[in-house]
Amino acid sequence: MKKINLLSLVTLSLILTITACHKDDPEKNGGKYSDGIFIVNEGIFQTGVGTISFISREKDSVSQDIFEVVNGRPLGNVAQSMAIFEGKAFIVVNNASKVEVVDAATFESQATITGLTSPRYFLGITQSKGYVTDWAGNVAVIDIDANSVSKTITVKSGPEQMLLSGTQVYVLNSGGWSTDSTVSVINTATDEVTTTIGVNHRPTGIAADKNGKIWIMCSGRGFNGWPQSGDSEGHLLRINPANNQVEFDYPFVSTTLHPEKLVVNKTGDKLFFLFNGGIYSFDITSTTTNPVKLVSRNNLYALGYDTKDEYLYVSDPLDYQQDGWIYRYRASDGSIADSLQTGIIPGNFCFGE
């Protein structure tokens, strides 16, 4: 029988230790991706690859490109958004015309949903059904059990974010490469559009407050940094879901500075959005006052709010060619908590359940 000397045992021990550390680096084996924040990095348009970064709340550390690390293949181009529903993460990959479905805790791939043209956002409806907006001018109904498109619902141009309120889903039609100014309302029982609400140009953000009222940010025709004749001002609207009527309208004066995004705080009484080089807040009970600038910072791209830590998350994509940064601010007073580097063009946040 062969003898194993002490040096061999030490060598074997080191090998096992290094291997274990390598495997546990993205926490693949532990499956602990649920308690943290995901950053969806778009990647360079058409030529780049989208990635997902993960911030662990427990360790306060960043793991990069976790989809490829776990699954051994790239995510695709462009990574648009991500949503967690029923223990699964639905990653919408725009240019690749697909939705990648992974286990939300381990990030191991479960399926790839195809049959889409230019998907944007996923919204879970029931345990077996979800919706995906598609710039083809429709909302795709997803059979979650079969991981396939079961039907499509025709809406207006450039459908983007959605919000579920009772049995109704509100779909923002921003126009895509053009400009739209409508919100489609879908009955989730029949998967049909019941009404279309006329709003202002380019709705880009939607949130529900503590009273169940629906707030919509309309950015106006045009884009920040590219003023053109015919640009229009933005509007912050409040819709009553009982009758789908606009009952409040706050107009922004400028036609060259466009408000974007919209999130609501944990208690549902304060809104946050991007505007004029920073983050602004708006108290839903003070509809006669102006929004307040909470944070001053230029070149902001994405906005998110974490109900657990009550932090506001914003991203800076720098030159859209190199790894970007995210900044975390305390929503209570706008003070900065920290900053972290992520992937190329951090464009969407998703918060673990």
Image (cartoon, rainbow, N blue to C red):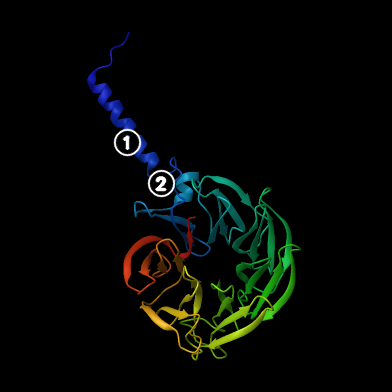
Work out which quarter of the rendered image holds the N terminus and state it.
top left
What number is the disc on residue 268?
none
Instruction: Work out how far the residue at label 2 is from the one at label 1, CA to CA, in angstroms.
Output: 14 Å
User: Mark 2 touching mark 1, by CB under 8 A?
Assistant: no
The numbered dot on residue 26 is: 2
In the depicted structure, whether residue 146 falls above or below residue 134: above
- Residue 78 seen in render: no
Question: Residue 326: image x %, image y %?
Answer: 38, 65
Give the quadrant of residue 178.
bottom right
The residue identified by callout 1 is 18
Residue 183 % position (x, y):
65, 76
The percent coordinates of residue 69 (x first, y second) are: 45, 46
| Residue at the (58%, 85%) spot, across then down | 248
Mark 2: few, some, or many residues within 10 Å (few <14, many ≥20)?
many
182 with respect to 283 (left or right): right
Q: Secondary structure at mark 1?
A: helix
Q: Earlier in the sequence, mark 2 or mark 1?
A: 1
For badge 2, the amino acid type reads Pro
SS at mark 2?
loop
Q: Is residue 330 visible?
A: yes
Instruction: Residue at 64%, 71% (x, y): give it.
Output: 171
Task: Choose between 300 and 27: the one closer to the eye.
Answer: 27
Residue situated furthest left in the rendering = 6
Name the amino acid, label 1.
Ile
Q: Residue furthest top?
A: 1
Residue 164 sits in which quadrant?
bottom right
In the figure, is residue 52 to the left or right of 194?
left
Seen at 42% across and 73% down, the residue is 300
Q: How busy is the neighbourhood of tag 1: few (under 14 within 10 Å), some, or many (20 plus)?
A: few
